[in-house]
Amino acid sequence: MKFAFCFFVALSVLSSAVQAKYVAPADVKSRGTKVSNYMFYNQDADKDGKLTLEEFKSQRMTRDVEQKNRLLKKKGLYKSPEEQFKLMDEDGDGKISPEDLAKYLDEQNRALNSK
């Protein structure tokens, strides 16, 4: 009887641990933020902290980018670089900030994972 009780308690503790949700610390950067920082470092030709459409389109087609584009096309979520830029440029000034890009990339990743 003691064994059954101990087993039940252990099982209930484990099941409650599985249900707990992970909350990332505030200083942990999202994948979109990391990619955005990398892109700005490599593509911001005039180093003004903003990307123009031409700078944005100058992204190298790496294997990762090609793979993500294939997945986006497969799920019906692909947008051309011009369409992506227009969505990110919320104020319409022809430039996007690192925060705009990170927000778009995070939204894109959520859409990919939910479909």
Image: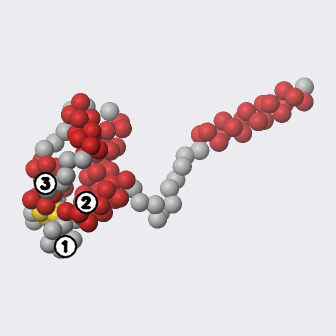
Q: Is residue 11 left or right of residue 84?
A: right
Is tag 3's residue or tag 1's residue first in the polypeptide sequence? 1
Crowd around label 3: few <14 · some 14–19 · many ≥20 (10 Å): some
Q: Is residue 50 left or right of residue 37?
A: left
Q: Which numbered dot is residue 39?
A: 2
Whole-percent x and y of residue 21?
55, 46
Is tag 2's residue or tag 1's residue first in the polypeptide sequence? 2
Q: Which numbered dot is residue 47?
A: 1
Q: Amino acid at mark 1?
A: Lys
What is the CA distance from the residue labelled 3 to the residue labelled 2? Answer: 11 Å
Mark 3 sits on what residue?
Answer: 57
| Quarter of the figure with the N terminus | top right
Q: Toward the viewer: 50 or 15?
A: 50
Which of the 4 image quarters holds residue 92?
bottom left
Q: Amino acid at mark 2?
A: Met
Whole-percent x and y of residue 103?
29, 55
Crowd around label 1: few <14 · some 14–19 · many ≥20 (10 Å): few
What is the CA distance from the residue labelled 2 to the residue labelled 1? Answer: 12 Å
Q: Amino acid at mark 3?
A: Lys
What is the CA distance from the residue labelled 3 to the residue labelled 1? Answer: 16 Å
The answer, for residue 87, to whether it is visible in the render is no
Which of the 4 image quarters holds residue 55?
bottom left
